[in-house]
Amino acid sequence: MHRFFLKIAALLGALSVMLGAFGAHKLKEMVEPATLSTFQTGVTYQFYHALALLAAGILYKRYRNKWIIWSGGAFIAGIILFSGSLYVLTVMQATEKVGVGSIGYITPAGGVVLIAGWLCLFIGIPASRVSERNEKDG
């Protein structure tokens, strides 16, 4: 599982850099500053959580438990929901499509999933060395 998280984290990190460059060089010519800010928020959160997924992949090698797995899954799902919805909103605003209301509900749900990922990561790291030994024995 840790290799999967590491590979996805690398791809999401690379995609963050590409989207950030697109936003800085081309998108700013196409949309209003507020829309560009929305897009940039998606890129920023995607990059931060790609790093969090990288950490989950590294930590899973040492702490093999369901919480670390759930953490990584939540980071992936949260990026898709949170950042993805902001990218869709940007495209809809750039193309002057109306009816973006329902997409806006996905963003906070994605944020909740990202928070859940952090909480699962917290729970997945044992509180003491005794916990680590018990995991190895069990």
Image (spheres, grey):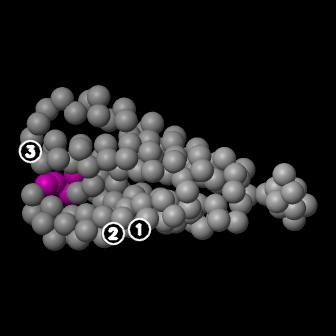
Residue wearing tag 1:
10
Q: Is residue 33 left or right of residue 65?
A: left
Q: Would residue 114 be seen by someone viewing this image from the given angle? A: no
Residue wearing tag 3:
95
Q: Residue at 51% x, 40% y: name it.
A: 112
List x then y, in percent, for residue 104.
Answer: 32, 35
Above or below, 37 against 109 in this view is: below
Residue wearing tag 2:
14
List x then y, in percent, for residue 94.
Answer: 12, 48
Which of the two marks, 3 or 1, is nearer to us in this view? Answer: 1
Q: How many numbered marks, from 0 up? A: 3
List x then y, in percent, for residue 130.
Answer: 91, 61
Q: Is residue 83 left or right of residue 24?
A: right
Query: Alpha-carbon neighbours of circle 2 within 10 Å: few (<14), some, or many (≥20)?
Result: some
The Cα atoms of the two marked residues, 3 and 1, are separated by 30 Å
The Cα atoms of the two marked residues, 1 and 2, are separated by 6 Å
User: What label sits on residue 132 in the rendered view?
Assistant: none
Identify the element where label 2 is drawn. Answer: helix
Do residues under tags 1 and 2 come within 8 Å of each other at their CB atoms? yes
The tag earlier along the polypeptide, 3 or 1, is 1
List x then y, in percent, for residue 33.
Answer: 20, 57
Q: Is residue 64 magenta?
A: no
Q: Nearer the viewer, residue 54 or 20?
A: 54
**Residue segment shown in magenta:** 31-35
Residue type indicated by callout 2: Ala
Q: Is residue 128 left or right of residue 5?
A: right
